[in-house]
Image (cartoon, grey):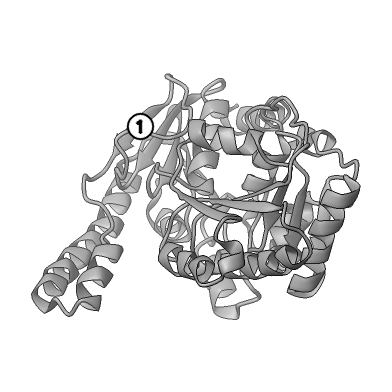
Amino acid sequence: MKKKVSILALHLGYGGIEKSICSRANILCDEIETEIISLYKTVDKIPYELDKRVKVKYLTNLKPNKEEFKYKLKRFNLIGAFIEGLKSLKILYLKKHLIKKYIKKCDSKIIISTRLEFNELLNKYHNKDTITICEEHAYHHNDEKYISRVKSSLTNIDYFMPSSMYLKNDYDKFLKGMSVKVKYIPLTIDKINECNKLDNYNIISVGRLSKEKGYDDLIDVMKLVRLKSEKIKLTICGDGPEKNHLQELIDNEYTLWEHVKITGFLDQYELDKYYKNASLYVMTSHEESFGLVLLEAMSYGIPCFAFDSALGACEIINNKNGKLIQNRDKEKMASEIIKYFKEKNNYDTIKTIEKYYVENVKKEWKKFVNELIM
């Protein structure tokens, strides 16, 4: 076994998991030779800063074609849908085959898996001298089938690393009696920015425009806010399958036309401009295993409001850096937003993110890795 760590990734495009993979690789390469094994190459340029010492290997040039298949099917293009369906089957086969093949031949001392389907393959096919680490970035929703699948994927694994303390506490119970060790090291924020003045009426929300993110509820909240204030504006930064639907909700409500904006995809440089011009971050997700984007907002000194249904947000947000709204109460969220802009509460976000700052988290990873490779 080489003194090397391999991190298994689905892709290195845009997303919280992908950002955390790059951050972790940057940390690890100070201690050990580090490589990222990405199944797909979905972007020409990795959108997150990656240390030059980190090697990246792509297993295929194929990309997921789920959206293309749905597009053809929706327009009753049966021949096109059939072709995309065959391509999809090929991709699914390669997804398993290529990762399995890599795991079998891998000579790294440590392998870190970042997805459940990769955990299952690592559990079954890794070399006996390899130290195996499986991460969990999804919330289980107390789904017995899902929890059972997670447990089955860890029967031959050394360490299981949930992305939040909430998940760690749950899996301490779920995995009791198993040989796998549950280990928690916080996700990281790479830099602390100069704090915003918070002197305008701009709200920001950032993420993939998908149903579980609850942006339709955020638009409903803004309808309520608009009844009491004409100054407050919302910018939703992101793209995804719900974009057209969300834009229709905005277009169909004349009071929102000039007050709610969807930017579409933004790179990190463009997103930085919107963060620097915001006074409040609002999250209405139905679920979040952690909520890295909240730390990103707090690094600009922006207070964060969220529904407590996103348990990952509950780990980060407290009354000193923002506010949690219970029971997905949209009227309560709206009233707290209005109250915030009216009273300009003195929230402090920097003390929160110090725990997750990369230089502090790096110490924990250094200690852990050195224990493994001694």
Of the 4 image quadrants, the one containing the C terminus is top right
Q: Is residue 325 above or below residue 47?
A: below
Residue at image x 46%, y 27%? 50
| Place of residue 358 in the rendered image (x, y in percent of width and height, measured from the top left) | 67, 29
| Residue 274, image quadrant | top right
What kind of element bears circle 1?
A: strand
Other residues around mark 1 within 10 Å, as few (<14) / some (14–19) / many (≥20) = some
Q: Is residue 122 above or below residue 295?
A: below
Note whether residue 118 is visible: yes
Which residue is more in the foreground, 75 or 38?
75
Of the 4 image quadrants, the one containing the N terminus is top left
Residue at image x 39%, y 34%? 46
| Place of residue 133 in the rendered image (x, y in percent of width and height, measured from the top left) | 54, 47
| Place of residue 117 in the rendered image (x, y in percent of width and height, measured from the top left) | 42, 61
Residue type at mark 1 is: Val
Seen from this angle, which residue lies furthest left?
Answer: 79
**Residue beneath disc 1:** 56
Which residue is more in the foreground, 119 or 354?
354
| Place of residue 214 in the rendered image (x, y in percent of width and height, measured from the top left) | 59, 67
189 with respect to 78 (left or right): right
30 with respect to 2 (left or right): right
